[in-house]
Amino acid sequence: MRPATKHAVPPAGDICRLSAVDLADAIRRRRLSVREVVTAFLDRIDAVNPLVNAIVSLRDRADILREADRADAHLAHAGHAGPLFGLPIAIKDLAQTKGLRTSFGSPIFADFVPQEDDFFVERIRKAGAIIIGKTNVPEFGLGSNTYNTVFGPTLNAFDPALTAGGSSGGAAVALALDMVPVADGSDFGGSLRNPAAYNNIYGFRPSQGLVPAGPELDVFHAQMGVEGPMGRSVRDMALLLDEQAGYDPRAPLSHHKQDCFLQGLQTPPAVGRIAWFGDLGGHLPVEPGIPSLCEAALGRFAAASFQTEALVPDVDFEALWQAFVTLRQASSGCALKAHYDDPLKRALLKPEAVWEVEQALQLTAPQIHVATVRRSSWHRTLLAL
């Protein structure tokens, strides 16, 4: 059940409360026009976004409506309608959007307008979505609290005294308050999942390579972060993931999609085994009450004949955590080094970004190798369960 919000927001209208799956179907069947749908969501953004600051770099309304009218004209002439046709979507502000400001939450890029889309953004456009703006992020995605000096903080969808999480905080809040029907996010260490949990929606971190990453300077570097979907339901996430996922030759570590995720939800899952790690034997602190909620959900799987088992793998979790930190610093810190090396740009970096670079500069090749070996060992441990 959706919790009550402490923000003084009006209830969403019927169009904005429809699922993304049902909205897309209504547009294709011409029960709703794209203009009607887009107008409803833009009105919702006007009413709600000033209270929470989830959507940034919103395009001019007239431009968006002209694109909506072109979509309606295309459909009226028996044009092809992709799975996301006519859906208004705001892209996370860590992904490049051609012709639309992409700040990465940093004053260094406050006025940057890319000349190309990220690969998954291309795919979303080709599926028919109308990109209306961006969703707010912490600077360069660093941190689990969505704020930056370009746009300011994003507030939790239900309580302004609480964090929205991050780094996909803007996307999560926009979804939770019905400002967009579905949203993309990305996840390095929880950035899809924790803001989803904090704002009572769904976030899913896909397997690495499922959604092609890029454009990147280094296309062969071992992946840590991934792109993925967020939604108000599992069906809506599956709808978006079906369009995000797939092989792209420009991203050689991406792979061909094997499944249709939305269609797959119509098939009862094969009975299987579920491992429940809990708090990893006390290694990770968990707020009281959360484990019991998770265990109650596990009980529903057990009732459906799934085998559920609480276990703690025999792993040095502190060493595993340090491996993650090392690989994060090697990836994020090195990516920011060019800004760090420029005194004028360094002054614009937040302290956490400066620290990340300085930690990366102290790493040695053997340290990075040990971290990748530990990560590989963890993968083998999971496969053996």
Image: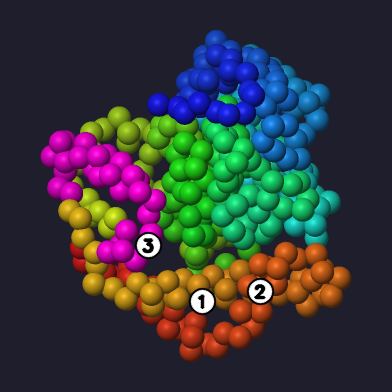
- Report helix, strand or loop for mark 2: helix
Mark 1 highlights which residue? 326
Q: Please give the residue where the numbered disc 2 appears in the rendered image.
A: 355
Residue 298 location in percent, x, y? 24, 43
- 274 horizontally vs 237: left or right: left
Nearer mark to the viewer, of 3 and 2 = 3
Residue located 62% across and 18% down the image: 10
Asked if residue 287 is among those painted magenta in the image, a careful observer would answer yes
* Viewport quadrant of the N terminus: top left
Distance from disc 1 to disc 2, alpha carbons, whole Å, reads 13 Å
* Mark 3 residue type: Leu
Q: Residue at x 51, y 30 (%)?
A: 83
Q: Quadrant of residue 141?
A: bottom right
Segment tinted magenta in the rendering: 279-308
Residue 284: mark in rendering: 3
* Whether residue 255 can be seen here: no
> Mark 3: which secondary structure?
loop
